[in-house]
Amino acid sequence: MYQKINNNNFILTTKKYFNIGCIIFDIDGVLIDVTKSYNETIKNTIQFVVGSIIKRDNLKDLVTDKIILKFRQTGGFNNDIDTSYAISLALLSYPELENSDLENFLIEVAEHADETGIDSVEKYIKKLISNKITSSNHSISIHKILDHLNYPGNIGDSIISTVFDEFFYGQELFLKRYGIKPKYYFGKPFIENDRIVITDNTIRKIKERFNGKIAMVSGRSKIAAAYALDNKFYLLNEKNNSVFLEDEDRKYAKPNPYGLKKVINKINTRNDILYCGDSVEDLIMARRAEDELNKKNLNKTKTNIVFCGIYGCSSNPHELINDFMEKKIDIIIKSINNLPHILNKVS
């Protein structure tokens, strides 16, 4: 059972007390609202890549926030380039469908995806195409589509990866990030549409409470995190404890617990660890990290990761709340700025 407080702005578990010794944040959807940056980058990347192949100019409207959310809810699409690739692959596999049918088809693909992310989508698309060829004798080469998209692949080699980051970073940051000039997009960077959610007052209260034991584990690169958070970045990256997974090997992407375990080992607290995230991937990562740390430290103090789910930046807050409640997470709040008040109630 959950206890609601203050007109549905916060929801708590019935557990009365957590002994929280440090706090770790996700960035996107927690510290920053990305609905006008990452979501728009996904839509524009798909329009650019798919539209140039099948000559459609209205795909951006077809790829809605609802569809993007469906992929994120699977637990395998924390990486938004993965989402761009999965949707592009689906659209290119069925170019003959009308838009009304394509929208339903994308939802169908998302519903058959799982924690394995693009692997699950590729498997499902290949199965559908195999059945399609068998039933209609209409040959569609999935291998040609895969070869053209070349994903995952390096910047400059994979059109999906390159176009996405050119849209998101813009010319100057793209050059700074990769050391090469963009070749597809030269307009305003979509990272400019990031909106910082966390306030100076919230940061001050959290810093006072946790005495420097603060960090971030984010799918972003360090360059993107620092640019978007501006002067708040250094306040939240205490002692350079944070991990930015875009800068790490792809195999460590969420929900792999690598980043969270790395930060927890750096901070080294015997108390409960609070992780604030906004997605199923974050929750899976937190639970895997807790399990793996406890298996490794059988004779030591048990690691307890308290998961705080934040729903205010979601395109479908009610659905996300229901997901969090079904998975029995510890704390659910609307905004990161509600956190100091909640901490006074539970720790």
Image (spheres, rainbow, N blue to C red):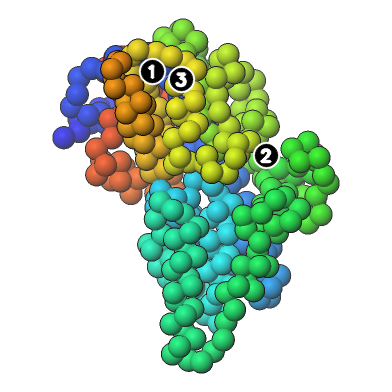
* Residue hosting label 1: 340
- Which element type, helix, strand or loop, lies under badge 1? helix
User: In the image, residue 209 lies at what x, y percent?
Assistant: 41, 9
User: What amino acid is at disc 1?
Assistant: Pro
* Residue hosting label 2: 192
- Which element type, helix, strand or loop, lies under badge 2? helix
Of the numbered discs 3 and 2, the one sitting upstream in the chain is 2
For image coordinates 48% across by 91% down, the residue present is 136
For image coordinates 44% across by 90% down, the residue present is 135
Q: Residues within 10 Å of mark 2 (few under 14, many from 20)?
A: some
Name the foreground residue: 119 vs 181: 119
User: In the image, residue 98 lies at what x, y percent?
Assistant: 52, 79
Per the model, the C-alpha gap separating discs 3 and 2 is 33 Å
User: In the image, residue 83 lies at what x, y percent?
Assistant: 53, 55
Q: Nearer the viewer, mark 3 or mark 1?
A: 3
Of the numbered discs 3 and 1, the one sitting upstream in the chain is 3
User: What amino acid is at disc 2?
Assistant: Glu
* Residue hosting label 3: 265
User: What amino acid is at disc 3?
Assistant: Asn
In the rendered view, tell whether residue 194 sits above or below residue 308. Answer: below
In the rendered image, the quadrant that contains the C terminus is top left
